[in-house]
Amino acid sequence: MYDAGKILTGLIVFVVLITSPIWYNMASGKASTVPKPEIVTQEKQCIEPTAFMRTNHMNLLNTWRNTVVRQDQRVYIAADGKQYDMSLTITCLKCHPNKTQFCDQCHTYEAVSPTCWQCHNVPEGNR
Amino acid sequence: MKFSKRDFLKITGLTILGIGIKPAINLFAQNEHQPVSPAPETLAGKRWAMLVNPKACTAANGCVDCIVACHRIHNVPDFGNPKDEVKWIWTEHYQNVFPGQENEYLEEDLKARPFITLCNHCDNPPCVRVCPTKATFRREDGIVMMDMHRCIGCRFCMAACPYGSRSFNWLDPRSHIKQLNPDYPTRMKGVVEKCTFCEERLAKGLIPACVEACKEKALIFGNLKDPNSEVRQLLRSHFTIRRKPELGTLPQVYYMV
C-alpha cells in the first residue's frame, strides 16, 4: 500500500471526528440535549405505569386502534383494574393537550413522525 | 473426573432447554388477562338495517337535514366540484337508484322524487371481497366498516361497489371542512370513505345522525334480528324494494315505495 501512514492516519482522524459526539457524551456523562416533554396534568399515573408508557405507548395505541376499529371493543382495562375509553383524542389528549410540548418533544428528538395527526384532531392552539 | 464428549453434549442440551423454558412459560402465561371490553352502553344489535320512506321524505322540497347532519358530524369535506365530491349520504333520481325496475308505467310521483341513498351495508359486500388490505370489512352486526389506517387508496372497492357509495379523497380534505367536529377524525389525502352507519354513535348508545336529524321520520334504523323492532314491523306491514337486488349483494337499506 502506498502512503499507508497517511491513509491510516486519515482514517483514524475521520473515525474519531465522526464519533466525536459519542465521545463527548461519554466524557461529559450526559447527553448534550435531552427532550423535556412537559406534563401538565395533575393525574398521578397514566394508563399504565410511566416506565411502561414511555417505552410502549406506541404499541398500546396500536392495539387500541385495532381493537376499537376492527373489534368494536372500546374499553381498556388497565393492569390496576381502572377502565379507560380507548381514544387518542378523548383519553390521551385529555391529560396531554399540549401536543407540541409533550408528544413532539421526544418525537422530534428521535426523528420519528407518527402519522396520527394527519387525521386525528389536536385541540385548538396546539397544532 | 473424566468429562466425556457425551457428558458435555448432555449438559449443553439441558442448558439450552433450561434457557428456553422461561420464554415459553411467559408466552402461555400472558394470555390470561383480557384487557379490553365493549363499551357498556353499546347498542346490542345483531344486524343493523335502515328503512327509507321516500313518501315521507321532503328532499324534493329542498330538505337536506340528514345530509347536513351526517356530513357535519363526520367531517366530510366539500370540495365544491362533482369530480372530487366526497359523500356519505346523498340524493339520487329514481332511474339511477333503481335501474333494474323495468315497469314502464309507474306511480307518477315516484319518478319525480329524489331518493336518499347511502351505503347499503350489504350482507355480501363486493367492496370487502376486493379490498387487498382488508381495510374494509364486514362486522358481525352487519356494518361494512372502514379501517382508515389500513386503506392504501387503491379504489378497488369503489370499482366494486355497484351503488357508488364510496368516495375517494383526491385532495387533502382538512382544508375543505367547513366546520370541524373535533370529536371525529378527518381523513387524509388518498383514502376512500363512506357511511359507517354511525358505528361510533352506536357504541355510545345513539342512533345514526341522519335518522336523528330527520324530522319526517323518513329514515328508520333498527335491528333486523329482533322480530319486534321497528324495522321488522315496518317490513312486515309495507312493501319494500332494495337497490339492484339482482346483483346478489343483499343490500340492507330498504325503500318503502
Image (spheres, coloured by chain):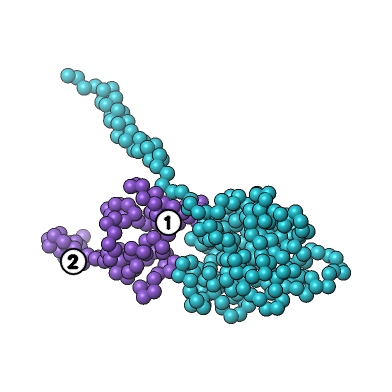
Chain colours: A purple, B cyan
CA distance for labels 1 and 2? 36 Å
Q: Residue at x 56, y 51 (%)?
A: B44
Point out the frontmost of discs 1 and 2: 1
Q: Residue at x 21, y 22 (%)?
A: B3
Q: Which residue is mark 2?
A: A32
Q: Position of residue A68 (x, y in %)?
A: 48, 55
- Name the foreground residue: A90 vs A106: A90
Disc 2, SS: loop
Residue flagged by tag 2: what amino acid is it? Ser
Q: In the displayed structure, would residue A104 be above or below residue A79?
A: below
The subunit letter for the residue under badge 1 reads: A
Q: Earlier in the sequence, mark 1 or mark 2?
A: 2
- Mark 1 surroundings within 10 Å by alpha-carbon count, few (fewer than 14), some (14 through 19), many (20 or more): many
- Asked if the residues shown at circle 1 and circle 2 are in contact, with their CB atoms under 8 angstroms apart, the answer is no
Q: Quadrant of residue B153?
A: bottom right
Q: Count the marks: how many?
A: 2
- Name the foreground residue: B138 vs B114: B114
Q: Which residue is mark 1?
A: A86
Q: Residue furthest right?
A: B105
- For the N terminus of chain A, which image quadrant? bottom left
Disc 1, SS: loop
The subunit letter for the residue under badge 2 reads: A
Residue flagged by tag 1: what amino acid is it? Met
- Name the foreground residue: B214 vs A60: B214
Residue B240, labelled with which disc? none
